Structure formats: structure tokens, C-alpha cells
Amino acid sequence: MAKNVRLNMQTGCSMSGDMLGLKGLLVTLGWNSRYTDLGEVVMEKTTQDLTRTTRALSNVNENLVKRTAAGKDAQLTRRPALKDQRNGANIPAADRAGGKPIAKATRSVAAKPTASHSLQKQEVVADRVHPEVTGIEREIQFVEYCDQVYQYLLAHEKKTQLEEEFMVHSPSTPKMRSILVDWLIQVHTRFHLLPETLHLTIYLLDIMLSRTKVDKNELQLVGVASMLVASKYEEMYAPDIHDFEYITDNAYNKKMILKMEAKILIAADFDLSRPHSLTFLRWFSKEMKFGMRMHHMAKYLIEMAFLDASLSPVLPSHTACACTYIAARLCDSPYDSERMKKMTGITLKEAEELGSRFAKVFLRLHSLPKLLAVREKYSSAKVLAVSQLYDSDIKILTELSS
């Protein structure tokens, strides 16, 4: 029988190069061409008696091998069973000698762990970082890497440290800066911004005062532009630029604020990733188990330090340490100097010196009739009214400052 394959070529049309090539290929494979009564080309192939060896397609699971020798069939031999291909080093000597089946070795591997194995597992768990944090909290808090992160922040804060007397060549005075910072804290509270936004705002303001000459007529413009930059960096929804126009009673328009924004970014070298003292305070509070009042007291003291330009060059970690030391005394709580030294390298003597320096500033600021934004902010019951200092607290600050 012949098998026909119709290529559907039109009568009278010459075949193209592709068609000629296809026809030649079919002829090579044993197909013949003929013309039908309608003039169509038909390819047909005559069935041939082909003898092929199909040994390769036989059942591979067959266990018999047929051999031929001297024209006669040899005896049928049985293929030997597969040997155990396991690594001999992992098999006990008794099993290797006796040739025991694989199933028994598998059962020995699945045996229950010994007491020494359980003890070793317990030791591994005990060596984990902060084993007291369990469950999903370990992933949320990045427990495995938190210590490394804070060590990086301790090294990075030194790159963004301000120089001592950074305002010595500025047309603006430290008193003008204090008034501006007090006003910025009020704006920050009114806009309900994050604490990190305030910290970055003060840092950008000081960067401008230290690296450029800011005239007193532009000081407020620098302040609102710094808060705008900080809001864009820290907030999920930053205030609109028209809000800053309104808050300055339209003293500065949108174009002026955007122009100052560009100057601030250039002065800061576009590096806004400075570690804040609040970041270190949270670290201390978590590691040393601060009480709620002590934590709020330290936050209050940190923001009070914003009002004094002489404390701006202090490293953020040292600022957090000094405020922690003073807050511990005011709240009658223990100060873990050994833990602080292990975490930051700050000794007890250095903490006392920092505490004395900050206590002098706090006493002076507390006696001023103005600059009340921070005190009003921390006078609510929500933060345990930590800004309401009593005579006993003033006495402690006096002792620390001496």
C-alpha cells in the first residue's frame, strides 16, 4: 500500500525554491512524485520491508541476557543483583561484613536522637542572640542583626558630627537659633509629625548654620525648608508646601522655599541618614529595661537639648547616654554603667561628665520664662507630665551640674 501526502500546489505554477527543496528531500527519503488527472502533484511512498534491530527498545527491566557464540545460542545467564552503592564509611562495620540489606541501614539512620544530640541542640539554642525574643518578633525586630546595626550607627554618627563653635562665623546668633528651634517644635507638634522628623530638622538647620552664612532674615526660611526636607525623608505623607507658606504667614512663597530646599541638600551633601539620639535611646531603653517614666523623661531631656547650640556637636549616642544618666537620677532608677560601657564604650566617668554638662544647660533653660514649647509638649498626662520638675528634681540637677 502507498501512503499519499498532498502538498496543495496550484496547477501550472512553478514551485519555489522551498518547495523544490522539500520535494528533493522527500525523494531522498524514498517518496515518488506523480501528477494526477487534475494536474496536482502527489507524493507517494511505497512500503518497504525494512528490517531493524529493536533490541534497544526492549524491556529494560528484563533480567535475562541472550548471548551468541560460534553460531550457537549460549546458556541463559542471570544478571547479578545490584550491589549496595552506599558509602562504606557511613555503614557500621557489622553491616559491611555481613552484607545486610539496605532497609536495615535505613532504619538505623531514622533512629531516635541520643541524649548527647539533644544536649547539643539545647546549647545551640542557648547561643542565639537575645533568646528571650521568640516567635515572629525575632523577624520583626531583626534580632539576629540588631547589635551589628547599632555598631554601624555608632561608627556612622562620627561622620556627621558638627564642629565645636559651629556658629562662630554665622550672622545668626545662638539666641536666634533657640527662638527658631522653639517655634519649629510648635510647628512639629501642630503638624503631628514623627519624632525623627524633628531630629532631622534640627540637624539640617545646624548644617546650614555651620557650612553657610545664614542671614537673620532668612533664618526662619531655613527652618521651614529644613522641616520640609525632613518630612519628605521621614514621613509617609509629608505636609504640603502651602502649609509651610501659611505657617509663616506668607512671609516666604513656594519658590523661595524650594530654592532653599536645594541649598540645604547641597550643604548636607544629600546625606540625610544621620543616626538620631532617639534611636540610641530606644536601644538603651530596650536593653536596660527602662520604666515608662524614665523613657519619657530621657526623651524630654533630649528635646530640651535642642534649644542650646552648644550641645549640638555632641554625638547622638553621647546625648542619649547623658540624658539617660540624668533621667535615672530624676526617676530614682538604677543606671547600668557596665551595660552602657559594653554597648557604647562610654564609661561611668564619661557619663558623669556628660551628665554634668547637660544638667547645667537644663537648669538654665528651666529658669527661662520663654522657650516653653518642649515643656508644654511633655506636660500632658500621656507622657506622665515629666516636664513638671519639683524642688527635689531641681536639687538633683544642681548636684549633677557641680
Image (cartoon, rainbow, N blue to C red):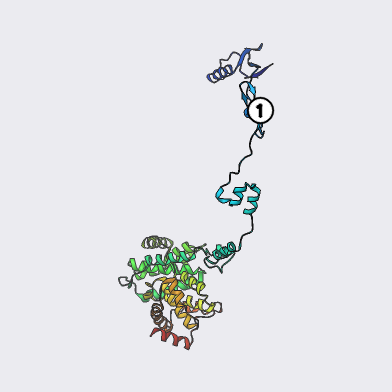
Q: What is the residue that sits farthest to the front in this orientation?
A: 97
Q: 88 and 332: which one is in front?
A: 88
Query: Is residue 214 at least partly visible in the picture?
Result: no
Is 29 located above or below residue 213 in the figure? above
Q: State the residue position of label 1.
A: 75
Looking at the image, which is closer to me, 222 or 288? 288
Dot 1 falls on a residue whose secondary structure is loop
Identify which residue is drawn at 64% across, 47% down: 102
Q: Quadrant of the C terminus?
A: bottom left
Of residues 170 and 115, the one drawn nearer to the viewer in this rendering:
115
Percent of width and height locating residue 19 = 56, 19
Which picture quadrant has residue 120?
A: bottom right
Q: Is residue 252 left or right of residue 134?
A: left
Front residue of 16/378: it is: 16
Q: Amino acid at mark 1?
A: Gln
Q: Is residue 270 above or below residue 19?
A: below
The spot of residue 70 in percent (x, y) is: 61, 21
Q: Is residue 163 visible?
A: yes
Return the x and y of residue 170 as percentages of the image width and height. 32, 70
Q: Please identify the quadrant where the N terminus is shown.
A: top right
Looking at the image, which residue sits at the far right?
A: 1
Task: Place residue 37 in its image quadrant.
Answer: top right
